[in-house]
Image (spheres, rainbow, N blue to C red):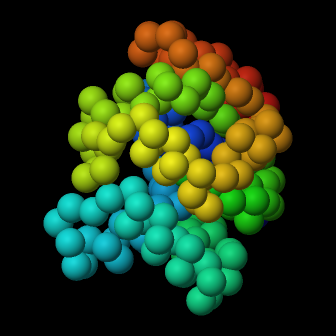
């Protein structure tokens, strides 16, 4: 008997609102959350209390070079395969991640799109990572890292796009509209 499962992947550049959408989905729709970055964060947390976006980017590239482009997907597959209900995987960064999500029946990709300057302004306020408070020039450099490079192209292939250039209430309303379409297809 096939499990009743919907797999949703979230893609968006740094500061786009992926975490906000993910937490909202967890609270309102009782989804199970996972992140492609979980294995990276778990590894870094063994050694450091705080680490930067650049630290995660470096480790992702090293893991991919050493163990293959699908290393982060492989780390999540068992968790997804054992799950049912709505599973949300946050942080699609590479085409391998996109294809991994789409390998599941009843899978959807949601792209959260925000202009770069607005993402930067939001990021410097959040204090989530040690390098969140950077100049706009540095933020643009971080946006060019290998782990960020494919986000816009992947977003263009997403099943749904949410424009997050207004306030939080608008973001949540747009998220509800997408979820109505997804849950209705169940």
The spot of residue 54 in percent (x, y) is: 41, 61
Look at the picture and state if 50 lies above or below 184. below
Quadrant of the rendered image containing residue 169? top left
The spot of residue 172 in percent (x, y) is: 49, 18
The spot of residue 29 in percent (x, y) is: 49, 32
Name, please, the residue furthest toward the left: 49
Q: Nearer the viewer, residue 165 or 46?
A: 165
Looking at the rendered image, the quarter that the C terminus falls into is: top right
The residue that appears at 26% across and 71% down in the rendered structure is 45
The spot of residue 99 in percent (x, y) is: 78, 60
Look at the picture and state if 32 lies above or below 184. below
The residue that appears at 66% across and 52% down in the rendered structure is 149
Q: Tally the numbered discs.
A: 0
Q: Nearer the viewer, residue 69 or 121?
A: 121
Q: Nearer the viewer, residue 112 or 104?
A: 112
The residue that appears at 69% across and 76% down in the rendered structure is 69
Name, please, the residue furthest toward the bottom: 66
Look at the picture and state if 59 lies above or below 121. below
Name, please, the residue furthest toward the front: 137
Left or right for 111, reference 27: right
Can residue 7 be seen at all in this image of the molecule? no
The residue that appears at 78% across and 54% down in the rendered structure is 102
Q: Nearer the viewer, residue 33 or 35?
A: 35
Left or right for 151, reference 19: right
Can residue 114 be seen at all in this image of the molecule? yes
């Amino acid at each position: 008997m096939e499990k009743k499962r919907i797999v949703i992947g979230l893609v968006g550049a740094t500061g786009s609102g992926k975490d906000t959408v993910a937490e909202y989905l967890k609270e309102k729709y009782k989804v199970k959350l996972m992140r492609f970055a979980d294995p990276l964060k778990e590894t870094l947390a063994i050694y450091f209390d705080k680490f930067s976006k650049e630290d995660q980017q470096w480790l992702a590239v090293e893991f991919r070079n050493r163990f293959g482009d699908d290393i982060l997907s492989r780390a999540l597959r068992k968790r997804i395969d054992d799950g049912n209900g709505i599973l949300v995987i946050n942080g699609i960064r590479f085409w391998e991640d996109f294809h991994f999500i789409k390998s599941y029946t009843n899978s959807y990709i949601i792209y959260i799109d925000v202009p770069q300057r607005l993402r930067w302004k939001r990021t410097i306020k959040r204090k989530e990572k040690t390098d969140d408070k950077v100049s706009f020039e540095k933020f643009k450099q971080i946006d060019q890292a290998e782990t960020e490079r494919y986000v816009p192209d992947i977003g263009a292939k997403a099943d749904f796009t949410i424009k997050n250039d207004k306030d939080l209430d608008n973001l949540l309303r747009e998220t509800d509209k997408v979820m109505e379409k997804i849950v209705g297809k169940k």
